[in-house]
Image (tube, rainbow, N blue to C red):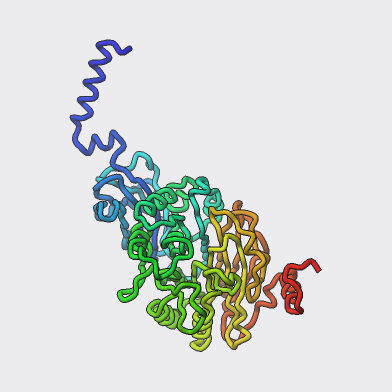
Amino acid sequence: MMNRRGFLWSASALGTLFALPKRLLAATLGYPRLLQGPMVGATTPDSVTIWSRATGVFDVAVDYATNRDFSDAKTTTPVRADPANDLTTRITIPGLKPDTEYFYRIRTDGIGDRNQPLPFRVRTAPADRRPLRIAFGSCARVQLDAVQPVFEAIRQMEPDLFLWLGDNIYADSDTEAAFTDLYARQRSVASLQPLLRSVPQLAIWDDHDFGFNDSDGTSPVKPMTLKLFDRWWANPAGGTADTPGVFFRYSFGPVDIFMLDGRYHRDPPKVPNGPAKTMLGAGQKAWLKRELKASKAVFKILASSTGWSRAESGGDSWAMYLDERDEILNFIRDNRITGCFGISGDVHMGEMNCVPWGDKGSYDFYDLVSSGLAQMLNPRFVDQTPEVRLRAPWVGSANFGILDFRFDPEPVVEMSVRNVLGGAVWDPVVVKAADLVNGRSTWRTAIDRKELERRERAGRGGGYYESK
């Protein structure tokens, strides 16, 4: 039991503590601080955006420096964490040098976070051609997997950029509280923290973070889910003045990325296919065509939450919107837009597919598919047959996609799916920029021998996966 002297000392110490000025008291208690973050958002050659969520209505600022000891440190103008935005902030650090490593740390109400005392590092986007590594994935269900070891493998791959292609949470709700809770839980996964703090993160959504399973443009809660998406991500843009959504174009060195919104404006999948049926909506489709024509990038990535091939017949992928998909591919051909290929997610397995548009006077449209980051794998999709399946589907573990770009001596992209340990699940597909021009058909040289045999057997009337 505490004696009289000890009691009096404790009381005196407590009185002294609460007599401290507010800021010193806050520092002593470890409050204010961040609830979630920091997370790196969109970067450019001369800026970096840092997202975070504070514990209260505080001013948030970022110290940044090129020296690890912060001897050349500068501090951004503070931004108030506002309850109207659920205490999240996005702070852009301007005036930086291209392709340069910076150290940074967060100040909340002028106080460093005692829970995160060490500085983080981030690199600005390149201004010219150099090798690039872009990682991507989809389908992260924290309710199913709270550990998510795949993110440690992604970090070890040292990507320059990470793209989230939807089902980034599984809210499946029409209430704001459910979305906020799942965003906070996913953003707090320990294995994810090093990646979020050092690698730029960009995102689009799919049905489970847009609304309910297979939801479409008729969803009555889409304005609410769009507000929350914009709150929890730090994309460079979202939609246009006339067309709401999460779509945007982002330039990263000599690569342009077209992040597409396949939910906000889509017609229900069960609507009969035809020229009027849309996944993108008229406004987004006009934007995409305009931006594709304007792009001078060597490679142009068309990022979709759902697969570009006709594999998932009866689902809610582009297989149910083939007229619109073909319209886009024909537009690319007719306007001689070079360097386009696709990436996608959703199907709970890894795939490497191709739409053979080289047979139609254009060039073959490759689609690298990765799903899921933290989700049950789904072998029932394996027996589907896209136009061309270049590699056997991967359902062995959580997985992510890797795009390795090289520009010397000629522009090339190497596409692979990696398992939960970071190992390649099959031989990568290597595509030259010179292959992505009208009049070129290259899928026959890219296809795996066994997949070619299966395709030829199916062409003779046999089963794609028969043993004979």
Quick one: 110 or 347, which is closer to the camera? 347
Quick one: 42 or 121, which is closer to the camera? 42
Please report the residue visible at 37 percent of the width from the left and 40 percent of the height from the top: 115
Please report the residue visible at 44 percent of the width from the left and 61 percent of the height from the top: 212
Please report the residue visible at 47 percent of the width from the left and 53 percent of the height from the top: 195
Q: At which x and y percent is residue 189?
A: 46, 47
* Residue 409 appears in the picture as rendered: no
* Residue 354 appears in the picture as rendered: yes
Quick one: 428 or 261, which is closer to the camera? 261
Question: How many numbered dots are placed on residues in this image?
Answer: 0
Compared with 39, 268 (above or below) is below
Compared with 206, 190 (above or below) is above
Q: State left or right for residue 14 relative to residue 407.
A: left
Q: State left or right for residue 407 relative to residue 379.
A: left
Q: At which x and y percent is residue 132?
A: 52, 65
Quick one: 51 or 213, which is closer to the camera? 213
Q: At which x and y percent is residue 263?
A: 43, 69
Q: Residue furthest right?
A: 468
Q: At which x and y percent is residue 288?
A: 43, 78
Please report the residue visible at 76 percent of the width from the left and 68 percent of the height from the top: 466
Compared with 462, 370 (above or below) is above
The quarter in which the C terminus is drawn is bottom right
Residue 393 location, quadrant: bottom right
Q: State left or right for residue 315 relative to residue 441.
A: left
The quarter in which the N terminus is drawn is top left
